[in-house]
């Protein structure tokens, strides 16, 4: 009887250890660019929430990680597991009439497979 209890406990432990939750450490990635009024926006901070299908709000501390877009407005979150993620971006647009304007945007992301490389662009607004 003891032997079966030990085997059951080991089996349950293996199930929990083999299950990966959303987050870093996988072989998938999400990339794209940030755009406002048809212009790609550089130096935009993009926040990511693991395991989310809806917004975690506008407070950056509620997100799990962040990246900044490059000079061409591109971003990549690499080493992710398949699953759902939510991206929230905060940037600045230099309006010719009003100067720098804060712009934000978000998108829900789904990575379907282990080695997926998906593209999601984030459209910003005032």
Image: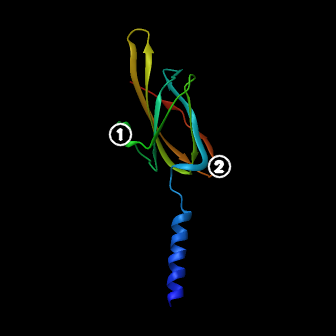
Q: Which mark is residue 115?
A: 2
Q: Residue at x 51, y 52 (%)?
A: 22
User: Residue 89's spot in the image, x, y percent?
Assistant: 44, 32
**1 or 2: tag closer to the N-terminus:** 1
Q: Which of the two residues, 23 or 34, is positioned nearer the viewer here?
A: 23
Q: Residues within 10 Å of mark 2 (few under 14, many from 20)?
A: some
Whether residue 17 is visible, yes or no, is yes
User: Residue 47's spot in the image, x, y percent?
Assistant: 45, 37
Q: Residue at x 47, y 27 (%)?
A: 44
Q: Secondary structure at mark 1?
A: loop
Picture quarter with the C terminus: top left
Report the side of 100 relative to 30 (left or right): left
Name, please, the residue furthest toward the bottom. 1
User: Residue 113's spot in the image, x, y percent?
Assistant: 61, 52
Instruction: Say whether marks 1 and 2 touch (CB < 8 Å).
Output: no
Q: Which mark is residue 57?
A: 1
């Amino acid at each position: 009887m003891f032997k079966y209890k030990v085997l059951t406990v080991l089996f349950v432990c293996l199930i929990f250890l083999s299950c990966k939750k959303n987050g870093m450490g996988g072989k998938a990635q999400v990339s794209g660019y940030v755009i406002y009024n048809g212009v790609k926006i550089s130096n935009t901070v993009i926040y990511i929430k693991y395991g989310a299908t809806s917004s975690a709000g506008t407070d950056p501390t509620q997100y799990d990680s962040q990246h900044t877009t490059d000079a061409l407005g591109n971003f990549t979150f690499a080493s992710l597991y398949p699953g759902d993620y939510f991206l929230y971006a905060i940037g600045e647009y230099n309006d010719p009439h009003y100067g720098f304007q804060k712009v934000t945007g978000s998108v829900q992301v789904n990575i379907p497979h282990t080695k997926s490389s998906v593209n999601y662009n984030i459209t910003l607004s005032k």
